[in-house]
Amino acid sequence: MTKRKPIWDMLSEEQRRECIDEIIAFFQDERDEKIGVLAAEQILDMMMEKIVWIAYNKGINDAKSLLQDTFADININLDLLIKGK
């Protein structure tokens, strides 16, 4: 039976392992604390659950803004093509 991923967990297994390793290294290097894989997984899950939708919505809003700017430029270019103005 495969483990079901929460909807907010968008990381591949490789990305997840890298993040867990980085969390463990951060606690060791920056705080001189040893944490295990389970604790690092819990930290990652908590952070993902809290920030993934913020990042997702920012990406959507950035794409929306880019498209609006692109369409505005297209409209200007099309207006320039109209004869007799």
Image (cartoon, rainbow, N blue to C red):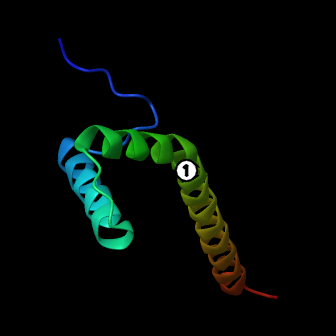
Q: Nearer the viewer, residue 65 or 50?
A: 50
Q: Secondary structure at mark 1?
A: helix
> How far from the left and from the top, in percent, is residue 38?
28, 37
Residue 73 in which image quadrant:
bottom right
Residue visible at 64% across and 82% down in the picture: 77
Q: Nearer the viewer, residue 33 or 76?
A: 33
> How far from the left and from the top, in percent, is residue 54?
60, 52
Task: Please name the residue that numbered disc 1 is placed on.
Answer: 51
Please say if 34 is above or below 85: above
Q: Nearer the viewer, residue 73 or 18?
A: 18
Farthest right residue?
Answer: 85
Farthest top residue?
Answer: 1
Residue visible at 32% across and 57% down in the picture: 23
Residue 38 located left or right of residue 82:
left
> How far from the left and from the top, in percent, is residue 55?
54, 55
Residue visible at 70% across and 81% down in the picture: 76
Residue 59 located left or right of residue 33:
right
Residue visible at 60% across and 73% down in the picture: 70
Residue 51 located left or right of residue 13:
right
Q: Quadrant of the N terminus?
A: top left
Query: Few, some or many C-alpha atoms within 10 Å of disc 1 (few <14, some 14-19, many ≥20)?
Result: few
Total numbered circles = 1
Residue 63 located left or right of residue 24:
right
> How far from the left and from the top, in percent, is residue 34?
28, 55
Q: Nearer the viewer, residue 75 or 35?
A: 35
Q: Look at label 1 and name its amino acid.
A: Ile
Q: Quadrant of the C terminus?
A: bottom right
